[in-house]
Amino acid sequence: MLAVKELDQLWHDDKEPLAKELVYHLTPSQINYLLFSCENEEKEHSKGKNGCYYIPNASPLVYSGFCAFSKMVRDARLYNNLSLPLFDNLRTGNWVLDYLQSRLENHSCYKDLVIWLTKYFGYIKVLPSHLKPKYFTRIIYVIREMICQ
């Protein structure tokens, strides 16, 4: 399956060239928005349309950015817990993928990152539902690694 092959390759590739292409040009405030952005900040950026993502059967998220999901993903790996509400949400639909991508689309500074997310989230969307949490987790780690380099 092409999607699995591409997602596995991304996991093994050197992240530094990717980071230079996608995130090195971002300012500290742009990285802050990418990773964090609280409910009020998200509403301000979206002119009241969006807040933090809502996951049924889970505590409300504190942030709208990738770090909101990073802790859940880290804990899932640490405790080998695939029954998280986030993973149930991923198995039943692509809403979280669409949310993360759409919140960046109206900001030109994230143009290349949105193209990249469209590609890799597109691969996740065509996977069997039981594989989606695994590869979503990998994308979250890749983004974190790119920013931390």
Image: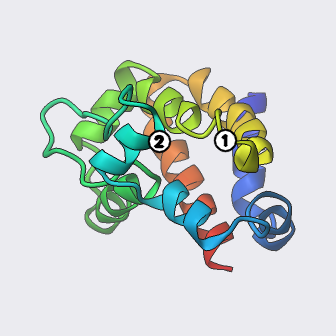
Checking the image for residue 77, the label placed there is: none
Checking the image for residue 107, the label placed there is: 1
Determine the residue positioned at 68% across, 40% down: 117
Task: State the SS at label 2.
Answer: helix
Q: Residues within 10 Å of mark 2 (few under 14, many from 20)?
A: some
Q: Is residue 31 left or right of residue 12?
A: left
Residue furthest out toward the bottom: 149
Determine the residue positioned at 31% across, 68% down: 78
Q: Is residue 106 left or right of residue 50?
A: right
Q: Residues within 10 Å of mark 1 (few under 14, many from 20)?
A: few
x and y, in percent, of residue 129 in the image? 45, 24
Q: Quadrant of residue 122?
A: top right
x and y, in percent, of residue 147 in the image? 63, 70
Task: State the SS at label 1.
Answer: loop
Q: As rendered, which of 50 and 75 lies closer to the eye?
A: 50
Q: CA distance from mark 2 to mark 1?
A: 10 Å
Q: Quadrant of residue 106?
A: top right
Determine the residue positioned at 52% across, 27% down: 98
Q: As rendered, which of 53 and 138 lies closer to the eye?
A: 53
**Amino acid at the residue labelled 1:** His
Checking the image for residue 45, the label placed there is: 2
**Amino acid at the residue labelled 2:** His
